[in-house]
Amino acid sequence: MRGKKAGQKPTLQVQHRKPQEIVQKKKEPEVIVHPPMDVTVENAQPGRMRKYPIVYEAMDLLRTYGYEPVRLSEPSIPINIIGMKQNGSLLILALRSRLPVPSAARLREIYTDKVDYLRSMAGRVKDRIMIWVYSPACGWRYYIVYPGGLRFDLDFPKSIE
């Protein structure tokens, strides 16, 4: 014992543990695939409620054109439906607006943040991105998102077949 005085206890070396790093898990979006629902059936599942009817109407529309729709629950990006088909998929933001949305300029004016985010995403993903808007005054309007802006889809049913 070097430098120890009589009666002094020897020191023990204790290994210090490194504090565990706290890693915040990024919340993964939950994907829910719903089969078509018949609301007239008495045996309807009690837990399945249509919180966003516009999204379900858009999903039914996708089914009529041969897509398998998938609804994203609490997405981190402004996409709430993915339409999957053998020849590709569609990323769709389905919205309901109380205000009329007759043009792409008006859509961008009302939903600036969502449109700008989808425009930035359009150049990075290979799938087509669309915004489907329902308003009581105009009905359904379909817009294709490009990196440079939006375009009203004049050939709507044919363009997704």
Image (cartoon, helix red, strand yellow):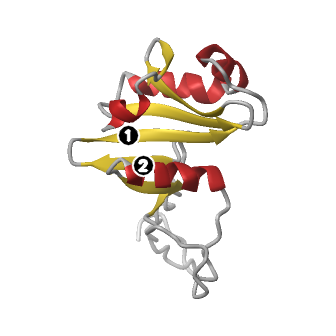
Q: Amino acid at mark 1?
A: Leu
Q: Residue at x 49, y 22 (%)?
A: 119
Residue at image mark 1: 90
Q: Residue at x 68, y 25 (%)?
A: 101
Q: How many numbered circles are shown? A: 2
Q: Residue 105 in the image: x percent, y percent?
A: 64, 14
Residue at image mark 2: 62
Q: Residue 95 in the image: x percent, y percent?
A: 63, 40
Q: Amino acid at mark 2?
A: Leu
Name above or below for residue 70 compared with residue 80: below
Q: Earlier in the sequence, mark 2 or mark 1?
A: 2
* Name of the residue lying farthest toward the bottom: 43
Mark 2 crowd level (few <14, some 14–19, many ≥20, 10 Å Cα): many
Q: Residue at x 68, y 61 (%)?
A: 51
Q: Residue at x 56, y 56 (%)?
A: 56
Quadrant in the picture for the C terminus? top left
The one of 137 and 96 positioned closer to us in this rendering: 137
Relative horizontal placement of residue 155, taking residue 9 as reference (left or right): left
The answer to whether one can see residue 25 in this image is no
The one of 118 and 94 positioned closer to us in this rendering: 94
Name above or below for residue 155 compared with residue 48: above
For the residues bearing labels 2 and 1, Cβ distance under 8 angstroms: yes
Q: Residue 110 in the image: x percent, y percent?
A: 72, 24
Quadrant in the picture for the N terminus? bottom left
Q: Residue 100 in the image: x percent, y percent?
A: 74, 27
Mark 1 crowd level (few <14, some 14–19, many ≥20, 10 Å Cα): some
